[in-house]
Image: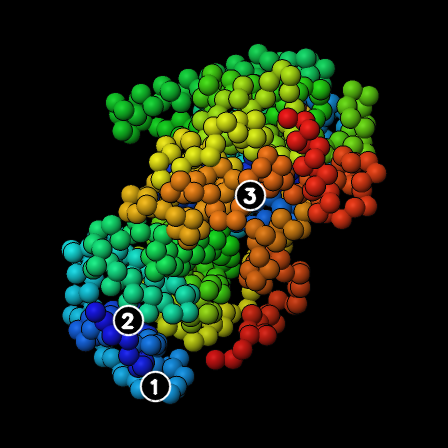
Amino acid sequence: MDLMEKLTILTDAAKYDVACTSSGAGNSAPRGQGIGSTADCGICHSWSADGRCISLLKVLMTNRCVFDCRYCVNRRSADAPRAAFTPKELAELTIQFYRRNYIEGLFLSSGVDRSPDYATEQMICTLELLRGHYGFTGYIHAKAIPGADPLLIDRLGHLANRLSVNIELPSERGLRQLAPNKSKRSILGPMAAIRDGITQNGEELVRYKSAPKFAPAGQSTQMIVGATPESDLQILRLTEALYKKYRLKRVFFSAYIPVVEDTLLPALETKPPLLREHRLYQADWLLRYYHFSSEELLDEDDPQFNPLMDPKCCWAVRHMELFPVEVNAAPYEMLLRVPGIGPVSARRILRARRGANLDWEDLRRIGVVLKRAQYFLLCRGKRPAGLIVTERNTVRALIDGAPVAQAEQLSLFGSELSRPAQQLREAAAECFVSGI
Amino acid sequence: MFCQRDLSYLYDGSIEGMLCCIFEAFARKERPRVICPEDRFEPNLFDWRSIGTSSAFAARVTAGLERKVSPRAAWIVQTLYLTAHPEKELLALDFTRQAFRFGRGVTDLMGGPIVSQAWKAVRQAYSEAHQYKGLTRFSDFDGVLVAESAPKNQVLPLIAAHFRVRLRNEQFLIYDRTHRQALIWQQGELGLMEVDALTPPPLTAQEEQTRALWRRFYKTIAIAPRENPRCQQTNMPKRYWKLLTEMQEETLPAPGHISLDAGRDAG
Ligand code: SF4
C-alpha cells in the first residue's frame, strides 16, 4: 500500500479525536543539531473545512484494533480498510511536513494492534526515531493505551511533550456498556501513573537540571459527549474532579458523531450536539481561567446548560444583585465575572486605571467590548449615557445570537420559525426572563 | 508647544530615517502635516523638506526614550515603524511627544487617543506576525526552504527569531511581497534584504509529492457533519489562501515545466 493511501486511512481514523493543540508546551529555544521548537501560546497552521485549527499531524500509528468499543470506527468488528505506518515512514513524513511549516508537531495515537504493549512499542519506536535520529525538538502529543505496561508508558512519557489517556465516556456505566475492553481502572490507572511521573520528574528536575523530562507539557484527556445520557452537571463535575485529582492540563469534549448503527447508541441520523459541546468548553474555560466552580454554574435543579445563553451570562443574570460594579474600583476577580470581559480586558482595565480615572470613552478605546458589559458596569459612578437598564433589556443583550439563528434546527420555538431574526431574539428573551 | 506646520517631511524609508524625522520635529518644535518615505510622496499644496538620515540622531531618539521614559516606550516607537498604520510616522512622533510629557506611565495611558492608537497598531502587527508563524509555507528547492508571504505589516523582523530557532539547521528564505523584503537564514547568519521579485526554480518531484500528501491530509482531517466554512474563513481569511499549499488545487504539470513565476507581476 502506498504512503498516500496509508495517510488517508490513518488520518480518517484519527480525526474524531478532538485535542489538537500545542499550547502550554512552554517556549523552547533549543540549539545545536536537530530541528524544531515549541511555543507556549500554541500556533495554528491551518483551519480545516469544519473550522477547527490544524496544528498537529494527527494520525494513528495503525487502525488495526483488537478492542471493540462500540462508538469507534476502528473497532474490531467494523468493516474498514486497515493500514499501519512503519515507524520510519511516519517519522520521515512528520519531518517533511514540519520543515515546510505545515505543522507544529505530531499527535500520535493508535489502535490496539495485537496487544496494548505491542501498539505502544510501535509508537515508542517512531518517537525514538524522531527524537534520536532526526533530533526533533518540536512538539509531540502521544496517547497512552489503556492496559499497556507502566514501563512502556513511562518510556513514552519521556519522549512526548504531552501524554493523554482518553477517559472516553463521562460515566463508568457508559464505559461498561460501550467499551467492554476498557474499564475505569485501566483508564484511571495510567492517568494516575502519568500524574505521579510528572510530579516525580518535577522533583528530579529541581535536583538535577539534566534529568530527562517526562511529559513536560502535562496531561490531558477527552470524553465523548452525547453518546450516553449523562447531564451537563455530571460532566462538569467530572471535569472539575479530573483537574483537581489528576492535575490535568486540559479536558477536551467531543460531540458524538454517530458512525455506527447500534441499538445502544444514538441513531445514525442524529446531529452531533455541537451547541452542547460549545457550552461545555465555555464552562471549562470558566473553571480554568475565571475561578468559577461547577456548583456555581449548574445544580441539581438545573443540570443542563441553557442553549440561549452562555454559562457566564446565565450566572450573571441569576446574580443581578452583585451588579453594577465600578470599573475604577472593582477587584480583578469581579471584573472577570462581568459578561463580555475576559482576562485580557480585565488586565487592560487594571493597567489603564493606574494612569487615569476611566470613563466610558476610555473603556472603548482600550478595547473593551461594551455590548454586554455595559449593563453590568459603572464608570465614575455613571451608567452609559442613554442606556436604559432593565432586566429585560439586559437579558436581550445577553442572548447568544448563534443558537437563535439556528433555531430552525433546534426547533426551540415551534411555530415561531418563520419570524425574522429580531423577533426571534425577542421571543428568546421573553422565554428566558420567564424562566428565571 | 509644538506648532502645527503645513509641511511634509520626506525620509529614506528606513527606521533610522523615521527616527531622524522625530528628531527634526523636536529640534524645531514643529509638527509637520505629513511624514512619508520619498518614494511614496504625492506632491501636495504644502512645502516639503527632505530629512537626512543620521545614525547618531536616530540613536539619540531611542536612547532618550529608553532613559527618560522607558524601554517599553522605545520599543513601541520602533515597532510602530513596522506597522501598516497609514500614518505610522506621525503617530510615532505624537507618541514620542506624549512619552516625554508623561514619562514612564505613558504606556498605561491606553484611554488616550494617541497611546491607544499606537498600542492598537503594535498589537495588530504582532497578531499578524503570530498568524504568519503558522501560515508560512515553505517549499524545498534542493535543500533550501523558500516561502512567500504578503503581510500588511512588516512582520519579517517579528518572526525571524522564531524561524531561526525552529529551522536552525536548515537554510531558508521568506519573501515578503508587500514590502519586497526577504528574510534569509544561511550558515548561521540571519539577514533582511531588499529583494524586488522572487523567481523560484521548478518544483522537484519530491516536493510535489510532499505537497500532495499534505493536501490529502488537509482534506481528510475535516469532519463532514461539522463542516463550517464561516468559521474556517474567520480564522483563516481568504487573503491568505493563495499562499497556502493546502488551498491550491492540485495541478501537476509535467515536472520540469513548472514555473512559480506564472501570474506574478514582473519586477
Ligand atoms: S481501543 Fe476502542 S477506541 Fe481505541 S481504536 Fe480500538 S476500538 Fe477504537
What chain does badge 2 belong to? B
Q: Secondary structure at mark 2?
A: helix
Q: Position of residue A254 (x, y in %)?
A: 63, 31
* Residue beneath the point at 80% across and 24% down: A262
What chain does badge 1 belong to? B
Q: CA distance from mark 3 to mark 2?
A: 48 Å
* Residue beneath the point at 27% across and 29% down: A209
* Residue beneath the point at 63% across and 60% down: B248
Q: Is residue B118 left or right of residue A43?
A: left
Numbered tag placed on residue B103 in the rendering? none
Density class for disc 1 (Cα within 10 Å; few <14, some 14-19, many ≥20) is few
Numbered tag placed on residue A388 in the rendering? 3
Q: Position of residue A408 (x, y in %)?
A: 78, 41
**Residue holding disc 2:** B18
What chain does badge 3 belong to? A
Whether pointer 3 and pointer 1 mark residues with C-beta atoms closer than 8 Å, the reply is no
